[in-house]
Image (cartoon, rainbow, N blue to C red):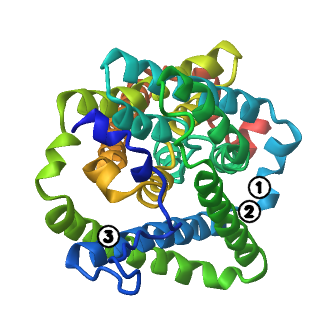
Amino acid sequence: MNSTADLSPQLWPNESFLYNMTTDDTGSNYTTSVTGVLDKTINILSVCMLFITMVTFGCRMEVSKIKHHIMKPKGVGIALLAQYGVMPLTSFLLTKMFQLNEIQAVVVLICGCAPGGSLSNLLARLLQGDMNLSIVMTTYSTLLGLGMMPLMLYIYCWGFPNLVKVIPYLRIVGSLVIIIIGSSIGILINRYRSRHTKIIERVGFVVMFVAGVAFFIYIKYVVKGDVASVFSAPLLAISGLLPLVGYTFGYIIPALFKLNQQERRTIAMETGCQNILLGVAILRTGFHHETIGALALFPLALICSQLIEASLFIVVFRCHQCFKRKKKDTYQPANTAEQPEVAMTVRPQDAA
């Protein structure tokens, strides 16, 4: 990918929040190529999938169960320190370490500066984490993302000469507003129409399936051979290292503050898992296809790494739990003090 073409100013911002449209010389006819239609469809589906996913996430929230973490926000504060301290810095250092060009760097930075995603809630559950803390963390990081994500991007993009002025800050805020609205709707549904939550979750799965098919079509017919650029050695290495660093420091930092094991595992998952759907939506709606190309698929490579690495942690944790249980059952000493007393029957002749 030619770095000179990448930084062409007219290609960076998208002219529309949802999709691009080009006109001919008269300005009266829109281009109706198959590629253009697919491109627009993917953009719209990205935003819809993000919104519906966040509605589904909101339906899982019960304010009464997370009141403890709201009143005593020590764990949440430490988690947000890890989320917005470790991940943006790590993504910046990795772009420098692997000497990425500026368009590749902006893709990595957008993913690294994103708030936590709902995938972390599932992973925290599988690791027997604190689910209330996990949900509160995702909510807080999303709310703070309205200010923190643009701020982090602004700070770290100064490391690249041409990036500060071309980041679509307003569209990033717009995407964050979408997920906040979606989460709020889900919370209201769960509070006042809880009987509908199961239906909404099923709809969410259907939408995700349709979106998966659409992404397959996008890869096959739109980006075609350009997919190789996403699976280059540097980007593959970054997609593996970014969540790994997040999981590691997400566990170490709360350990330094003496949080319990359950909270450490939860914060580790929350730190290592970004909102990948948000990254896809920003890349698809904030930049022209000619500029971003197949790099819009980088968040999908990142989520694969998140799942693979988290699955390894879950397997190790489950094996450790199983080993501890077997060891306890095998070597537990018998307690003679608790032996049942033998009842003695006194016969009348003995009493006489």
Distance from Cα at disc 3 to Cα at disc 1:
42 Å
Distance from Cα at disc 2 to Cα at disc 1:
6 Å
Visible residue check, residue 343: no
Q: Nearer the viewer, mark 3 or mark 2?
A: 3
For label 3, the residue is: 39
Q: Dot 3, crowdedness within 10 Å: few (<14), some or many (≥20)?
A: many
Single out the residue that lies furthest toward the left. 225
For label 1, the residue is: 65
User: Residue placed at 55% from the left, 79% from the top?
Assistant: 200
Residue 42: percent from the left, percent from the top?
35, 70
Corner quadrant of residue 210 = bottom left
Amino acid bearing label 2: Glu
For label 2, the residue is: 62
The label number, if any, that marks residue 144 in the structure image: none
Q: Are marks 2 and 1 in contact (CB under 8 Å)?
A: yes
Amino acid bearing label 3: Asp
Residue in the foreground of this view, choosing between 305 and 313: 305
Amino acid bearing label 1: Lys
Residue in the foreground of this view, choosing between 126 and 283: 283
Is 12 positioned to the left or the right of 118 in the image?
A: left
